[in-house]
Image: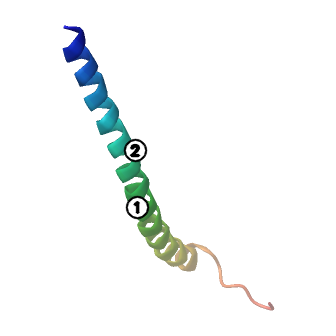
Amino acid sequence: MGDILGDSYFLLYLILVFLFYSADIVITLFCCLFCRVLDKWSSKLWVQVAPPKRGR
C-alpha cells in the first residue's frame, strides 16, 4: 500500500511540475495575446469614449 501511495505522490509531483512549467509558458503567451487585444480594445474604446483633445 505504501509503494502505491509513494508512486501516486511521485506521479502527482511530476504532473504538478509539468503543469507548472507548461502553465508558465501558456500564461506568458496568454498575457502577450491579452495585452495586444486589450491594447486594441482600449484604443478603440478610448477613441469612442474620450473627447478629442485640442490645444495640445
Which residue extends farthest top?
1
Q: Is residue 55 above or below residue 36?
A: below
Local packing at callout 2 (Cα closer than 10 Å; few below 14, some 14-19, many 20+) is few
Q: Which residue is mark 1?
A: 30
Residue 45 at what x, y percent from top left? 51, 72
Using the image as rendered, state which of residue 35 and residue 24 is in the foreground.
24
Camera-near label (1 vs 2) is 2
Please identify the quarter of the rendering in which residue 4 is found: top left
- Apparent side of residue 22 relative to residue 28 in the rendered image (left or right): left
Element class at badge 2: helix
Using the image as rendered, state which of residue 25 and residue 55 is in the foreground.
25
In this picture the colour scheme is: rainbow
Residue appearing at x 35%, y 52% in the figure: 22
Residue 46 at what x, y percent from top left? 57, 74
How many discs mark residues in the rendered view? 2
Q: Amino acid under label 1?
A: Phe
Which residue extends farthest right?
55
Local packing at callout 1 (Cα closer than 10 Å; few below 14, some 14-19, many 20+) is few
Which residue extends farthest front?
3
Pick the quarter of the image with the N terminus.
top left
Please identify the quarter of the rendering in which residue 55 is found: bottom right
Q: Which residue is mark 2?
A: 20
Disc number placed over residue 18 in the picture, else none: none
Q: CA distance from mark 1 to mark 2?
A: 15 Å
Residue 9 at what x, y percent from top left? 30, 23
Using the image as rendered, state which of residue 36 and residue 32 is in the foreground.
32
Using the image as rendered, state which of residue 6 and residue 56 is in the foreground.
6
Residue appearing at x 40%, y 58% in the figure: 25
Q: Is residue 35 above or below residue 25?
A: below
Please identify the quarter of the rendering in which residue 47 is found: bottom right
